[in-house]
Image: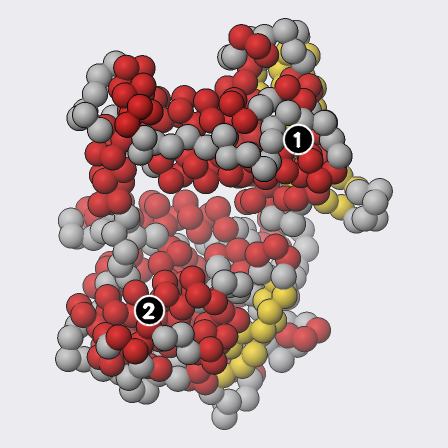
Amino acid sequence: MIKFEIKVIKYLSVMLGTNVKHYVLLAEHKGKTTLISIPNLYLYNKSRSSLQTSKRYATLLAQFYRFLSTQKRFKSLEPGDYHIHATNTELRQWQIYRQVNRVNKASPHPTSETIFNDACVVLYFFKWLFDEGIPTSVKISLKTWTANFKDRRMLSYIAKKTRFALDSNPIRVLDKQSRQKKAVHLIKHSEVKTLLSAYPDKVYATLFKFALATAMRPMELVKFPYMGNGKNRHVLPYSEMDKESKSFSYEVLGKGNKLRDIIIPAYALKLLDDEYIKTEYLARAKLYRERFGHKCPLSTLFLTSEGVPVTQSMISNATNYAKKLAIAKDPSFSVTNIFYHARKWWPTMMMVQHHNGEKILEKNAEVMHLALTQVIMNQMGHEDPITTYNHYLVLARYLIMANKGITHETIHEDALNIHQALEMFG
């Protein structure tokens, strides 16, 4: 039995002359553990810029390889040769295998959409092989790798493979359950207050408020400095900054190691100063020095109560813990709320302001405004204008419909006060 696992490695890339970090795929076979060369070359080439992306790609490749190892045709093959012998048929059968397991467990996850998207990720691996001239039996130009879960014969086949059927169409039933758990909404003002009070450490509440005001991703928030340098050398604690400016530019190193300039309102920096830097930072920086043996670098601002730099995964874990406390305090607190919802407030408010409140419900609001879309895309770090515009148009309409008759005319690009907006639109 071959076991597949993933692991993070860090090393000096001879080609780049710098250290790189990404996940790799390993196989435990015949008493030894080996690196599977071809998938790992792919992970190096396509995922080293983002550890989160690398983990997703590696996890899905490991799942697919694990599935291949159970197939009769692959029993006698070395794992390093799987990419040569895998075909469109195996990629389709993997999707069916996952769907059968899902129905057997009567679970709404993974959804049909997720199963398809995961297969697309694996297909991109085979496309890379084709582009690099590496032998493979997967035909990229053919759609025979897709599993059509709406086809009546496919549904009948899956029903026979499962131990029981929830319905004559169990997949659609499960997908419907999943969609009910993923209703599009914004976190309510009351829920924001409950969540902020539930965080075990004040630093996470501060980060959530800062995300509301800037739309930065968690991976971007944790890199925000105590004092900036280079293009961000003007970023200082608010008490040392120009009080006449309503907003400041800030260069963000975002997803995929892409740089972009965003707007940070002055009130958000004042919030950091009043609620964290003046009251928490110095004591935490002292603990950092005691723990690590040197001063906390000026590039690091957010520290836990134990003096440890906050990471993206720590934000996620702290929020999951805070959610449990929030639900215990208020049973109406939505279980679907996540930290990332804070990022949606900034573009939603921009959309509401541009369309003057209730006018966003009119049909002509669906005509994309290029200047507004560009501002939102830049702040968010998005690349698809149509998807970006339509997504936040839906959220803005949801907000107005939930608070019909209320408008907010003071929100604008230079001084977008999300926390005032929460009071109005919560």
- The answer to whether 193 appears left or right of 202 in the picture is left
Give the residue number, with chain letter if any, for mark 2.
393
Q: CA distance from mark 1 to mark 2?
A: 40 Å
In front of the other: 352 or 83? 83
Figure check: 183 above or below 224: above
In front of the other: 266 or 168? 168
Could one spot residue 144 in this view of the protein? yes
Find residue 213 and report its image quarter.
bottom left
Figure check: 375 above or below 54: below
The mark found on residue 401 in the picture is none
Find residue 236 and report its image quarter.
bottom right
Q: Quadrant of the C terminus?
A: bottom left
Could one spot residue 379 in this view of the protein? no
Residue 145 picture location, percent across and down:
50, 30
Secondary structure under tag 2 reads helix
Residue depicted at 55% across the width and 14% down the height: 69
Residue depicted at 83% across the width and 45% down the height: 15
- The answer to whether 106 appears left or right of 70 in the picture is left
Residue 144 picture location, percent across and down:
50, 30
Please, what is the three-letter code of the amino acid marked with disc 1?
A: Pro
Figure check: 150 above or below 330: above
Residue 258 picture location, percent across and down:
63, 61
Residues packed near mark 2 inside 10 Å, few (<14), some (14 to 19) or many (20 plus): many
Which mark sits nearer the N-terminus, 1 or 2? 1
- In this view, the residue farthest toward the bottom is 244
In front of the other: 256 or 200? 256
Give the residue number, with chain letter if any, for mark 1.
39
In front of the other: 40 or 212? 40
